[in-house]
Amino acid sequence: MKIEDKLALNKFEIDKEVHIQVEEKLCQGCDLKPCLYVCPAECYQLRENHMTFSYEGCLECGSCRLACDRQAIRWVYPRGGFGICYQYG
Ligand code: SF4
Ligand code: SF4
């Protein structure tokens, strides 16, 4: 099964409150931009040389928080009842 098919099994209860915030001005001097490569949901995108982020499809894996060595990411879990609901099988 491809990762796209597995991701399609998940359900999201999107919270209006953003649970991850990126201080984008710190991204401008970040050459490698590891968040682009570690996020399995591709929440981080580079558009016209600007880092963009959307939290809605976040899998709450925490990889971006570990990969960013500039402390540009403020990361908390979504509020109770919100966020991803994993489905198996
Ligand atoms: S790793 Fe951190 S500083 Fe670098 S582009 Fe991603 S969020 Fe910005
Ligand atoms: S926690 Fe995981 S899925 Fe969510 S934005 Fe960070 S790397 Fe992507």
Image: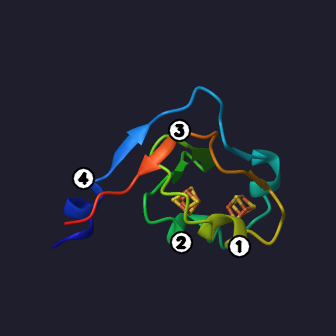
Pointer 3 residue: 82
In the picture as drawn, the residue positioned furthest to the left comes out as 1
Q: Secondary structure at mark 3?
A: loop
Write the residue at 71% across / 73% down: 66
Earlier-in-chain disc, 1 versus 3: 1
Q: Earlier in the sequence, mark 2 or mark 1?
A: 2
Q: What is the three-letter code of the residue carrying label 2?
A: Val
Q: Regarding mark 4 in the picture, which secondary structure is present there?
A: loop
Q: Ligand 2 within 8 A of label 2's CB? A: yes
User: Which disc number belongs to residue 8?
Assistant: 4
- For mark 1, what is the residue? 66
Q: Amino acid at mark 1?
A: Leu
Q: Is residue 48 left or right of residue 74?
A: left
Q: Is residue 47 above or below residue 35?
A: above
Q: CA distance from mark 1 to mark 3?
A: 22 Å
- Residue type beneath disc 3: Phe
Which mark lies nearer to you, 3 or 2? 3
Specify which label sits upstream in the sequence, 3 or 2: 2
Spatial separation of the CA atoms under disc 3 and disc 4: 17 Å
